[in-house]
Amino acid sequence: MAKLSPVSWAELVRRLHALEFEGPYQGGKHPYMVRGNMVLTIPNPHRREISIDPLSRILKRAEITRKEGLEYAE
């Protein structure tokens, strides 16, 4: 099984766009993206990379399998 690797904030947004999420929009303390009736809060863009642990939590909340998340890594 392939492994997730850390990604930049811009890369996360690009991958989510590929999975039909819209945004990011600013709301409260954190930006968010939307797909249908799902609202997904994402980390602030000021950090260098989004590490594996938060990335896997984002994928889980977005109901994206690891395989789907990795397909867009290439």
Image (cartoon, rainbow, N blue to C red):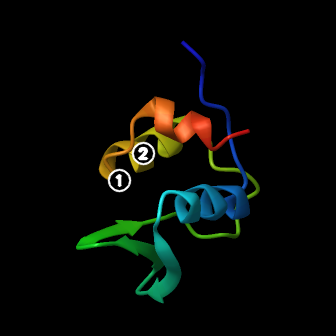
| Location of residue 73 with respect to 40 vertically, above or below | above
Quadrant for the C terminus in the image? top right
Spot occupied by residue 38 in the image (x, y as percentages of width and height): 27, 68
Spot occupied by residue 56 in the image (x, y as percentages of width and height): 46, 38
Q: What is the three-letter code of the residue carrying label 2?
A: Leu
| Residue at image point 70% right, 56% down | 11
Contact, mark 2 vs mark 1 (Cβ under 8 Å):
yes
Along the line of sight, the residue nearer the viewer: 39 or 71: 71
Spot occupied by residue 23 in the image (x, y as percentages of width and height): 51, 80
| Location of residue 67 with respect to 60 vertically, above or below | above
Quadrant for the N terminus in the image? top right
Along the line of sight, the residue nearer the viewer: 61 or 63: 63
| Residue at image point 45% right, 81% down | 29
Element assignment for label 1: loop
| Residue at image point 42% right, 45% down | 59
Q: What is the three-letter code of the residue carrying label 1?
A: Ala
Q: Residue furthest top?
A: 1
Along the line of sight, the residue nearer the viewer: 12 or 48: 12
Structural crowding at the residue carrying mark 2, measured as other residues with C-alpha within 10 Å and reported as few (<14), some (14–19) or many (≥20) = some
Left or right: where 18 falls relative to 11: left
Residue receiving disc 1: 62
Residue receiving disc 2: 59
Left or right: where 48 falls relative to 42: right
Spot occupied by residue 60 in the image (x, y as percentages of width and height): 34, 42
- How far apart are the two marked residues, 2 and 1, measured between alpha carbons? 5 Å
